[in-house]
Amino acid sequence: MKAKILYIEDNEQNFYLVHFILDSRGYEVLWARDGQAGIQVALQERPDLILLDIQLPIMDGFTVAHVLREKPELDETPIVALTSYAMPGDRDKAMDAGCNGYIEKPINPATFAEKIEEYVSKS
């Protein structure tokens, strides 16, 4: 059985592309449209990996990562920032907030699943 991945993303087109790629590889892909909902889904579903957009409504991704890291039941779950934030220092800021990885959008569909597999295999 393949891993369960939660994608916290407010943009439907971004979600559907990631869902299409990962679903075709057998992953179960869950979706939350804002940071607060993402925290709730993560606590309920205990995914194997969390993909996290940074620019989210209600609560930004940096805050979401920080809150998730405070939850003992999720402190070992890999969190990967999947974001168009690509300014100098954004990667470090995501890692400081509790992310284990950082992938810039737009994603490369040819290599995206392999990158995700690296994080899932560590969980």
Image (tube, rainbow, N blue to C red):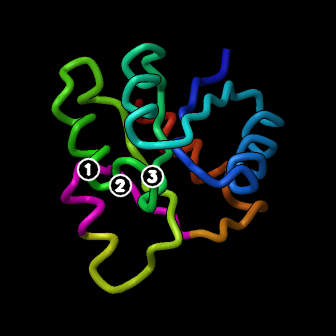
Q: Amino acid at mark 1?
A: Thr
Query: Within the image, what quadrant is residue 68 found in?
Result: top left
| Image height of 26 relative to 103, above or below | above
Residue drawn at x 77%, y 52% as measured from the top left: 17
Horizontal placement of 44 versus 59: left or right? right
Q: Secondary structure at mark 2?
A: loop
Whether 96 is among the magenta residues is yes
Disc on res. 57 = 3
Distance of label 2 from label 1 (alpha carbons): 6 Å
**Residue position for label 1:** 63
- In the image, taking residue 25 as reference, residue 33 lies left or right, namely left
**Residue in the foreground of this view, choosing between 66 and 73:** 66
Of marks 3 and 2, the one in the foreground: 3
Rendered location of residue 58, percent (x, y): 38, 47
Distance CA(mark 3)–CA(mark 2): 7 Å
Q: Which of pointers 3 and 1 lies earlier in the amino acid sequence? A: 3
| Secondary structure under the numbered disc 1 in the rendered image | helix
Q: Report the amino acid beneath label 2.
A: Asp
Q: Disc count in the image?
A: 3
* Contact flag, marks 2 and 1 (Cβ < 8 Å): yes
Q: In the image, is 17 to the left or to the right of 80? A: right
Start-end of magenta stretch: 93-104
Give the residue drawn at x 83%, y 36%: 24
Look at the image and tell me in which quarter the C terminus lies.
Answer: top left
Residue at the spot of label 2: 60
- Decide: is 50 above or below 59: above
**Picture coordinates of residue 82, whole percent (x, y):** 51, 58
